């Protein structure tokens, strides 16, 4: 990869961290946007220690002004963003009848509206360059549904629809837009749901054809391909990384 500038949201933990590390290893200049600014800076520092180029910024994707300010800072420090990986996400498991309006709005704000805001914020740069790559991280739960995750699955399903719309609008301008819906990936988010008793990892492993839970690096590898030059004919697609559970 030539030295293109990439923004990875939620890049301080789990899947986003693996994506940030992989894109930096492939030669991208990586900006990590995360609610946890300290963790974003630590991850960026660790990438730089390994010879990559990265900056970590405290950006809440639900705050449009903060997103725009973050993108302006990226432009000044790393150049125009050409790659965006919308990975920041929040999962809440609760029975549908207990979901409050506040819970619902928060889940949609982070997982869906945050994704759209980041796309809107970087698309003008991509249009000016006539080249861009957007990868939205959705969830395998959009294939199957997931009991007690109404707001999460609704938001992630929205991400799939949004991806298709943006692909239709922007692919003629050299910008591809795809979504990766991961299956069970070993990250702090998954560990948290396991510890709370919502997910039985042994059972999930048995139900996964490749016979293991996914690693953040599995998603990062797919992402690295989708943002590459040679993936230019792949757009508007849902590319599952789930060990064969959903086809
Ligand atoms: N781990 C899985 O099994 C799995 C499965 C399907 C989908 N996903 C999706 O993958 C993405 C990454 O998940 P993960 O498992 O690595 O989770 P994680 O909790 O380890 O990491 C999520 C990161 O997003 C950041 N974040 C949360 N809200 C934010 C906000 N408003 N603004 C900016 N950053 C914010 C967090 O601080 C954290 O660093 C999420 O979108 C998640 O829904 C994960």
Image (cartoon, rainbow, N blue to C red):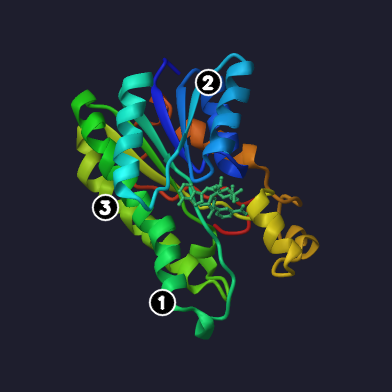
| CB within 8 Å, label 1 to label 3 | no
| Residue 233 found in image quarter | top left
Q: Is residue 135 left or right of residue 122?
A: right
Question: Which residue corresponds to the image point at 54% horizontal and 35% vertical from the top-left?
Answer: 40
Q: Is residue 236 left or right of residue 202?
A: left
Residue 60 at x, y percent in the picture: 42, 47
| CB within 8 Å, label 2 to label 3 | no
Question: Which residue corresponds to the image point at 63% horizontal and 54% vertical from the top-left?
Answer: 189
Q: CA distance from mark 2 to mark 3?
A: 29 Å
Disc ID at residue 101: 1
> Which residue is the extreme one toward the front?
38
Question: Which residue corresponds to the image point at 58% horizontal and 18% vertical from the top-left?
Answer: 48
Q: Please determine whether, in this image, residue 43 is positioned above or below residue 203.
A: above
Mark 3 Cα-neighbour bin, 10 Å: few <14, some 14–19, many ≥20:
few
Q: Please determine whether, in this image, residue 240 is positioned above or below residue 72.
A: below
Of pointers 2 and 1, the one earlier in the residue sequence: 2
Closer to the camera, 14 or 65?
Answer: 65
Ligand 1 closer than 8 Å to the CB at disc 1? Answer: no
| Residue that badge 3 annotates | 165
Ligand 1 closer than 8 Å to the CB at disc 2? Answer: no
* Secondary structure type for disc 1: helix
Q: Please determine whether, in this image, residue 38 is positioned above or below residue 182.
A: above
Mark 1 Cα-neighbour bin, 10 Å: few <14, some 14–19, many ≥20:
few
Of pointers 2 and 3, the one earlier in the residue sequence: 2
Q: Is residue 212 left or right of residue 247?
A: right
* Secondary structure type for disc 2: loop
| CB within 8 Å, label 2 to label 1 | no
Residue 23 at x, y percent in the picture: 51, 27
């Amino acid at each position: 990869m030539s030295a293109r500038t990439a923004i990875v949201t939620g890049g301080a933990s789990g899947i986003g961290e693996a994506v940030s590390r992989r894109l930096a290893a492939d030669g991208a200049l990586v900006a990590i946007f995360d609610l946890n600014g300290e963790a974003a800076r630590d991850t960026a520092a660790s990438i730089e220690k390994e010879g990559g180029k990265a900056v970590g910024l405290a950006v809440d994707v639900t705050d449009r002004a903060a997103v725009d300010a973050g993108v302006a800072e990226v432009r000044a420090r790393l150049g125009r963003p050409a790659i965006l990986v919308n990975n920041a996400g929040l999962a809440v498991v609760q029975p549908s009848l207990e979901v409050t309006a506040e819970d619902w709005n928060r889940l949609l704000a982070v997982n869906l509206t945050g994704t759209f805001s980041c796309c809107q914020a970087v698309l003008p740069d991509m249009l000016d360059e006539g080249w861009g790559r957007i990868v939205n991280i959705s969830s395998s739960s959009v294939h199957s549904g997931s009991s007690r995750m109404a707001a999460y699955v609704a938001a992630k399903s929205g991400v799939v629809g949004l991806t298709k719309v943006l692909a239709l609008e922007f692919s003629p301008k050299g910008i591809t837009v795809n979504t990766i819906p991961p299956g069970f990936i070993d990250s702090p988010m998954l560990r948290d749901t396991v510890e709370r008793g919502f997910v039985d990892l042994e059972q999930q492993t048995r139900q996964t054809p490749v016979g293991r839970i996914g690693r953040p690096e599995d998603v990062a590898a797919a992402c690295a391909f989708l943002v590459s030059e040679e993936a230019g004919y792949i757009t508007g697609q849902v590319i599952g990384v789930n060990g064969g559970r959903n086809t």
